[in-house]
Amino acid sequence: MVSHNIITGNSHTDERGKLNFFNDFDLRDVVRMYEISPASVTNIRGWQGHAKEHKWFYCSAGSFTVYLAPLTYFNNSKEEQQTQKITLYSNSPSVLHITGGYATAFKAKEENSTLLVFSNFSVEESVADDFRFNLEEWPINQ
């Protein structure tokens, strides 16, 4: 099962300013979006998982570390529950796509960082597919 992929964006700068664009980010499946601005760089938000819901993460300001762990209960995998660590930077435009069957946790690396989150589920569908875990469930190597 594929856990994630990076949709690489690009940017253009001229006398009018800077434009970030994501021509390969297909928004057909997205039904909602929200923005997260952590109060502190010491806070870790997570673990939250979904069996079916897909999420796309875009760091629009600052930087974030996103931690990813497989929900082996859902994908019947024998793989060890190892976490992956992905860093998103606003100055390197990219969108992180995470499939269902995984839990995420994330932490801002800089003050005033902002993370946009896109989902293919409505709020009601997401709540029915929501699984939350203690931060100690998987190791977070900072």
Image (spheres, grey):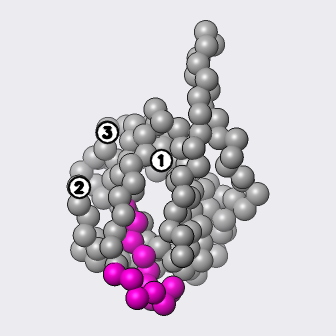
Circle 3 sits in a helix, a strand or a loop, which is it? loop
* Sequence-earlier tag: 1 or 2: 1
Q: Name the residue under label 3.
A: 110
> Could you classify mark 1 by the number of other residues whose Cα lies within 10 Å: few (under 14), some (14-19), or many (20 or more)?
many
The mark nearer the N terminus, 2 or 3, is 3
64 to the left or right of 42: right
Q: Which residue lies furthest to the right in this view?
A: 28
Q: Does the magenta stretch include residue 74?
A: yes
- The amino acid type, in three-letter code, at marker 2 is Gln
Q: In this view, does 27 lie above or below 79?
A: above
Q: Give the range drawn in magenta.
A: 67-80
- The disc label shown at residue 142, or none: 2
Q: Please name the amino acid that badge 1 sits on.
A: Leu
Q: In what quadrant of the picture does the N terminus appear?
A: bottom right
Residue 125 x %, y %: 64, 76
In the displayed structure image, the side of residue 103 where residue 85 appears, left or right: left
Residue 12 drawn at (x, y percent) = 61, 23
* Residue that carries the numbered disc 1 in the rendered image: 115
Q: Do the residues labelled 1 and 2 touch (CB within 8 Å)?
A: no
Front residue of 35 and 118: 118
- Residue at 52% over, 63% down: 4
Decide whether residue 121 is among the magenta residues.
Answer: no
* Residue 31 point in image, percent of width and height: 70, 61
Q: Which mark is residue 140?
A: none
